[in-house]
Amino acid sequence: MQMSPMPMTARVKGMNSRSRLRLRNLSTALSNGGPEALAWGIVIVVFGAMAQSASLAEMASMQPIAGAQYHWTHNLAPANQKRFITWMQGWVTWFAWISTLAGVANTTATMIQGLASVNYPEYEPKQWHITLIIVGMLIVQVLMNMYTFWLIPWIEMLAGILHICLLIVFLVVLAALAPRHTPEFVFLHTQSTSGWANFPAWNIGLLTPVWGFVDSKLSVAGFDGAVHMSEEVRRAKQAVPRSIFYTVIANGILAYAMAVCMLFTMGSVEEAQKSSFPIIEICRQATGSVKAATAMVSGLLVISLSVNLASIASVSRLTWAWARDGALPQWFSHIDRKHNVPIRAVWLPVVIVMMLACLNIADGAAFGAFVALGSIGLFMSYFIAISCMVHNRFQKHAAPLGNWNMGIWGLPVNVFALVYTAWVTVWLAFPSALPVTGENMNYAAPIFGASTLFAFVYWFIKGRTRWEGLNKEVIRLAVEGGALQLK
């Protein structure tokens, strides 16, 4: 069956450390490198994300397919290692997207709780409140993905319009009402209050804009998410690569404008850093009103809800593809005949996230540990796929490029993307502050190691002997640009 086409300072007590880190990304940058790290670091990140997205766009033009990274790896990897690398890539990507969904849901839920705390001082936030918000939000958005999937493109379009409108609102309000910092403060002021020396602090501060592009916080939908919807996009070989690349360019410009404006107008740095929600405190200082700050941040909440909705759609298609290719049970590759949606694949990642969210009740750090996997897992999936692309360029009988390609600039851009990805991946494993404790520990590396170990062991249990590899008919249809059919 063919699927439907995809046409104010208020601390929030009880939030786990990872939640605080995600919502206090601005505080992380200010305490690791200071304003200079954010003002200049975001330029590096935008160029790095452009290189990553351009490299992925080239591969998407060759094979616009829901499996994305693991399909491209299979297409471009050395022949004698193709099955093993594809297997590892598929599991790394799937675990990373489950973690990313958990992170987006957790951020959105904590934002809701934070706005409640700001407006109702008598409210005492609890860990289990976050879990209930996550579960309720996911159930509603799963039902939307199941029964009103046709609405999601319209919601995404409206979120995109709101994205632009909010940028204008924030720029006008902050520029007109907020106090001013000097250019020296924005572009030359370096500070490290996290315990790290200047060099590691600057690189850890760089992760603030990195998280924005990886976890879809600065864009309505991250460039990786669009790839997994490829099989439901008309003229996917042309539309998907353009969407991947130009989304990063557009959001890079918008993000830089917003970051520089915020640094010039953020008011008291100390007050912003004390707040669990710096953006609320910055807006409160600018407007002098909690209600006005709440209205502005509520717009960001709407976008975050839209990102969560889109994330469910993307991870469900990746789950469906991975089941269709035999790594996950084939039962999850079923397409509902009435709604033309892989309902079982929609529910699987959501149920996993709901179960993980229950860890918040007993120990928020445990849930945060799994959420930490998202960024490092996605970066590793990019690194594997782009490495295979570089390998392919040097082959005598290289796989042909698609219509969207970078020509002679392809290899230099791929190499720069690899260097950038590897460099950032190293710092993604660092804790944001010293001394390291159980609460502020960055569990990204050990959790990534555990998920990779699972995939490696499972390879010897099933992959090496019982896994038949990717569905060749699906690959053929993707390359030819035909609509995929499931019988």
Image (spheres, rainbow, N blue to C red):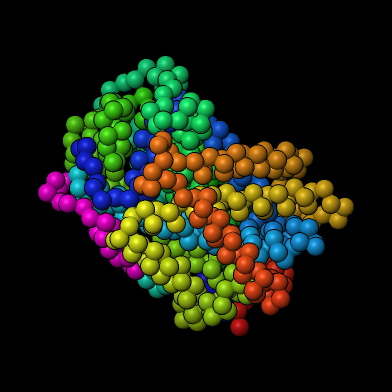
**Looking at the figure, which quarter contains the N terminus?**
bottom right
Q: Nearer the viewer, residue 384 or 402?
A: 384
Percent across and percent down for residue 328 are 57, 73
Determine the residue positioned at 70% across, 64% down. 84
**What residue lies at 62% left-to-right and 67% top-to-bottom?**
457
Q: Is residue 418 left or right of residue 24?
A: right
Residue 279 visible somewhere in the drawing:
yes
Expressed as whole percent of the image width and height from the top left, the position of residue 358 reads 33, 64
Q: Residue at x 87, y 52 (%)?
A: 396
Q: From what the image shows, is residue 365 above or below residue 183?
A: below
Q: Is residue 205 magenta?
A: no
- Residue 385 vs 7, above or below: the answer is above
Residue at the right extreme of this rendering: 396
The answer to if 135 sits in the magenta stretch is yes
Residue 156 in view here: no
Residue at 19% x, 44% y: name it.
Answer: 118
Residue 42, image x, y percentages: 50, 33
Question: Of residues 453 and 315, which is closer to you in this image?
Answer: 453
Residue segment shown in magenta: 119-141
